[in-house]
Image (spheres, coloured by chain):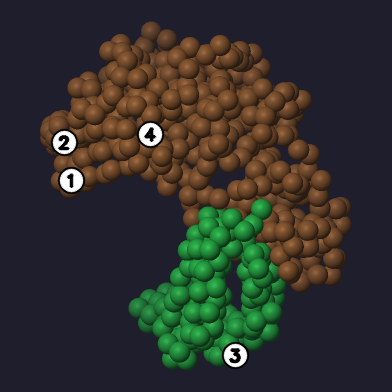
Amino acid sequence: MVVNSMIKRRDHMIEILYQNYHQIKHFFFPILAFALSFLGANSKYKPIIITAFIIFCICVVVHSILAWRNKVFEINSHHVKISKGVYKKTYNEIPLSRIKSINTSDSLLKRMFNISDFHLEIIGGDEISFVLNNREIKDLKKDLFSQIPEESNKVISQRLNLMEYALIALTNGKLYLSSLSICFAMGSFITSHFAVQLGLATKEQMVHQQADERSFWNKSNEAFSTTHASEWLIVLYVLLGIFVISCIINLIISYLTYRNFKINNNGKELTIQYGIINKKNFVIPISHIRSIQIIEPVLFQFFGYAQVRVDNIGVGHQRTAWLTLMPALKKKHIQRLLNDYLNQFDNVSIELTPDKRTIPYYLITHVFKLYRVIFMAILFYFFSKVALVVLIVLMFSGFVSWRHSGLTFNHNFLAYSTSTFFKRKTIITLKRYVQTTGIRKSILTRKNNKAHYVFSLFSESLVERYRCSFLDRHKANDFLNYIVKNRN
Amino acid sequence: MNKVHGKSKNIWNLGTIQFTLIVFLVGCAIYFVFSEYAVARKSFFLISIGSVLYLLVNLLKNSITYRQTGYQLTGNAVIIYHGGFTTSEFTVPLSKVQHLDVEQTFYSRLYNLYEITIYTGGDNHTIGFITIEEATKLKNFIIELLAQDGGKFND
């Protein structure tokens, strides 16, 4: 491995600007907006809040300049050396052999300056990031993972259809929350600036509203107490409208996020690229892939689709703890996808599943968890009808959990299937990453010749343990002997 | 199966009594500070009942746990048994062991007993409480095997 990067360097200067923009947009601006809306836009505290905001912004600017100046790094043929810090200085020297994956990401602003974020993920869960120009990143990638060809012939672009984008959009909760906030921001802008033109209010009402010094909290309370029963239907239509608009925004965001989805396997590394505005590029050595996850949210199940993810070795909480191999795909095509890109994996079927006699146990154990019992008791005390509905939903969730639970273990893989609130998840792990296996027997299982199968997987989270409940006991000994040949 | 030391029961019981006392004292504090509120009085009553039940159930559980808790060393794995109302049996291949901890808790010092925790890449298992001789023997056995075979005696 020859690395021609033994000069000390800093992040690109544009990073100072970007950090400031990011901090102010994502941290200070929402706090300011919340404080102003809570206390009222015309509150007497407004000048104090705005002064505090300006002081904070100046602090952020000074801090980001110092942080940029103090962050110095050097990559040589053996190590990445990095020193950084404003108040506390840290110095790190990381052997190149400990790098488990590299990935790049950029944004529209960064693309204009031909620069990207370059992230190195270290075995052990740490991540270091640099901001470099694209030429430097290309050279570094070649040096760090020398096998990556500059122009690969095997890059295959996966075109998602409208149905697949819709499924992604409707099942991504986090994305939906951001769409909802965009929707509310747009609604607030329109009603405060164009209410007269749209016939929603008269000029007098608008003047009165602008002079209103009450906080958002007080206004909302009054609005709730004065709304008549007949007006709730209109409120319902408005909420429905907000939902539909949010879904459309969600669809657009999903399109921009996953457009140009490309996967490439050059035999040593798996490269995944996607995005139009924010381009993402991930490179993982194939030897570092621990397992694959097949995720099926409820909507995906209805239409026979699934999402395939890749678990990186030493799964932690970093961005590449798991990577999307395919955001939406027909279930019948999963095997083909694996054959094309990850042929060390098979879409194995789940063989050991709990039988029908165990359904009541799944229903009971799903409801009788300490925090759920306390929650349900409080709910029954105050809103008995709502509590009954929640109880039925919980029990149904237990039934779905029974339906999706299962385990398979063979010479190459251990596959485990479970469901969390109706979302099915199957993890197929290479056998060598299974750390321990165990069998648990409780009073309920002993009577029925059943057992809970427990296993742990290699992970940076210190403990990553899974349990498949109420399976037949006849495979228990095989399971205990699974990772050691004849343990006795 | 090598069973854990008989005094383990006492150590677990002392831990249970300590926890029960802490909860009960918190309940008392709530009662004396907020005694004019009916909710505080009811909470104290519930906490007291809960504490007594917890104490009784756990004292019973500890004596059952003792009967089924132990370990077994084989050529390539440690098999760990844990009892109680729910019993479990775990296979920890020696090739997957990352490191070991030998510890003494506050109460185990009273009996000069130790517990040994075996860490793998995915979870950890504790064997306790055992004598220092047994803990050292177990620790040395695992470390020597790891050193000799470089963790490649399995698969």
Q: Residue at x 44, y 22 (%)?
A: A280
Residue B150 can be seen, yes or no: yes
Mark 1 and mark 4 on one chain: yes
Quarter of the image for residue A160 reads top right
Alpha carbon distance from label 3 to label 4: 51 Å
Q: Secondary structure at mark 1?
A: loop
In the rendered view, does A449 fall on the left or right side of A180? Answer: right
Mark 3 and mark 1 on one chain: no
Mark 3 and mark 2 on one chain: no
Where does label 4 land, which residue? A120
Residue A228 position in % (x across, y down): 53, 33
- The numbered mark 2 sits on a residue in which chain? A
Alpha carbon distance from label 3 to label 2: 59 Å
Q: Nearer the viewer, mark 4 or mark 2?
A: 4
Which chain is green in the picture? B
Density class for disc 3 (Cα within 10 Å; few <14, some 14-19, many ≥20) is few
Q: Amino acid at mark 3?
A: Gly
A477 and B51: which one is in front? A477
Q: Is residue A482 above or below residue B101?
A: above
Q: Secondary structure at mark 4?
A: strand
Looking at the rendered structure, the number of numbered marks drawn on it comes to 4
**Location of the N terminus of chain A (image quadrant):** top left
Q: Secondary structure at mark 2?
A: helix
Where does label 2 land, which residue? A70
Q: Residue at x 71, y 43 (%)?
A: A412
